[in-house]
Image: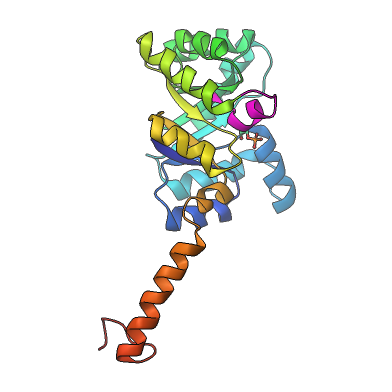
Amino acid sequence: MKLLIDDADIQAIRRVYEYYPIDGVTTNPSILARVGLTRGKRNPYELLTEIREFVGEDAELHVQAVSQRAEDMVEEGIHIAEMLGKNTYIKIPAVKEGLKAIRILSAEGYRVTATAIYTPQQAFLAGKAGVDYAAPYVNRIDNMGLDGVAVTKRIHDLFQKNGLKTQVLAASFKNTRQLLELVEYGVGASTATETVISELCRNETVDRAVHAFLEDFESLCGEGHTMLNV
Ligand code: G3P
């Protein structure tokens, strides 16, 4: 499963990339607004270009179109791809106009991610329309009183059973249990915040075990010594 960071804050992206194996960056208009307004860079392309330069041309970068009509989504999507490079995925909401835009963009060879997916039926239509990824919102589905992980697994299954090339790009995680269940299921990709990604390896019992190794070693060789200098 690919793992991406769901953020447009270059500092958070740098921190996560420094420590963890990350395959790319996802953004949406709300994320861009939050980062742009708090960090004083109001043009989204400034943020996104900085991210592209940092992650490199081979990393996935997902950027959403905000137009409401299919033809405008297509035009906007092509502009996004031209501005940000070949490995940019144009995110289009899986609604009626979006499905029309997805079909056009996919047929023209653009990489497309269907977003705002809450149901398997939306995902099915997006898959048929040719998207590379479909992004179900796991935690938001949970908050509707449903089971976001189960819905995401159904979406993964329906792509496989119908021979569609579309992969799941699961989004909107609030805890590592949601993410781990989808890793175990083998969905194509997940995108999460720095907090959730960091929580994947935060464990006080593990920290205590590692600290005990250090204490034992230092009791043998003295404080500050390592296998490098004994
Ligand atoms: O792009 C979709 C994802 O970022 C939604 O996450 O946390 O707003 O539910 P969230």
Between residues 40 and 27, which one lies in front from this camera angle?
27
Q: Is residue 13 left or right of residue 37?
A: left
The stretch of residues the image draws in magenta is 135-146
Give the quarter of the image for residue 6: top right
Coordinates of residue 185 in the picture (x, y in percent): 40, 29
Ligand 1 picture quarter: top right
- At 47% across and 40% down in the image, what residue appears? 4
Q: Quadrant of the C terminus?
A: bottom left
Q: Is residue 139 magenta?
A: yes
Q: Quadrant of the N terminus?
A: top left
Between residues 226 and 21, which one lies in front from this camera angle?
226
Depicted 14 relative to depicted 34: above or below: below
Coordinates of residue 7 in the picture (x, y in percent): 58, 43
- At 39% across and 49% down in the image, what residue appears? 21
- At 52% across and 53% down in the image, what residue appears? 198
Task: Check the image and tell me how it is coloured.
Answer: rainbow
Give the quarter of the image for residue 48: top right
Coordinates of residue 31 in the picture (x, y in percent): 66, 39
